[in-house]
Amino acid sequence: MNLYTKNGRPLQVSGDKVYSRSGKIIGRIKGEKVFGTNGRYVGTIVRDRLVYRSTQSTRLSSGFSAANRAGTAKANRVGSAIWGDEPNIPD
C-alpha cells in the first residue's frame, strides 16, 4: 500500500503499522483509522492519504509497542484537497 500525508509526504506501511519516511513508528491501522502507540487518533486513511480530522480526534484505541524501521527515499507527492488537516507526524 502506498500512503502519503494530506500534503504529500510519503509514509511506509508494513502489515497494519504505519511509519514515517525516516522509519519512526506512527501508528497502527484499525479499519480506516490510524492510532498512535499511546492509543490516540493520528488520522483517517482516505484513498492513498492519511488525513487528520478533528471531529474524530476524541477516538481512542488500545496502546501498543513497535520498533522503528529503516527509512525510505520515496519522493513527495502533490498535496490533496481532501477534507481534513495535515497530521502531526515527525519526518
Image (cartoon, helix red, strand yellow):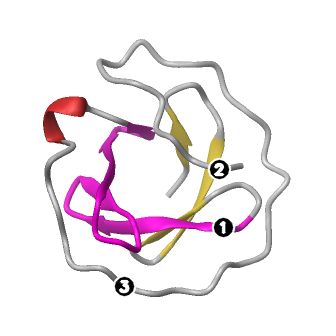
Q: Give the residue drawn at x 64%, y 19%.
A: 78
User: Do the numbered discs 3 and 1 sit on residues whose CB atoms are within 8 Å?
Assistant: no
How many other residues sit within 10 Å of disc 3, few (<14), some (14-19) or many (≥20)? few
First along the sequence among labels 3 and 1: 1
Residue beneath label 2, please?
90
Tell me the amino acid under the disc marked 3: Phe
Span of residues in magenta:
23-51
The label on residue 24 is 1
Residue 28 falls within the magenta-colored stretch: yes
Question: Which residue is at the front of the view, 57 or 84?
Answer: 57
Q: Position of residue 74 (x, y in %)?
A: 78, 48
Name the quadrant containing residue 23.
bottom right
Residue beneath label 3, please?
64
Check the image and report above or below for 77 versus 65: above
Tell me the amino acid under the disc marked 2: Pro
Left or right of 1 on screen, residue 69: right
Check the image and report above or below for 46 versus 73: above
Q: Secondary structure at mark 2?
A: loop
Q: Position of residue 56 (x, y in %)?
A: 16, 40
Tell me the amino acid under the disc marked 1: Lys
Q: Give the residue drawn at x 48%, y 18%.
A: 80
Magenta stretch mostly in which secondary structure? strand
Check the image and report above or below for 16 versus 26: below
User: Do the numbered discs 2 and 1 sit on residues whose CB atoms are within 8 Å?
Assistant: yes
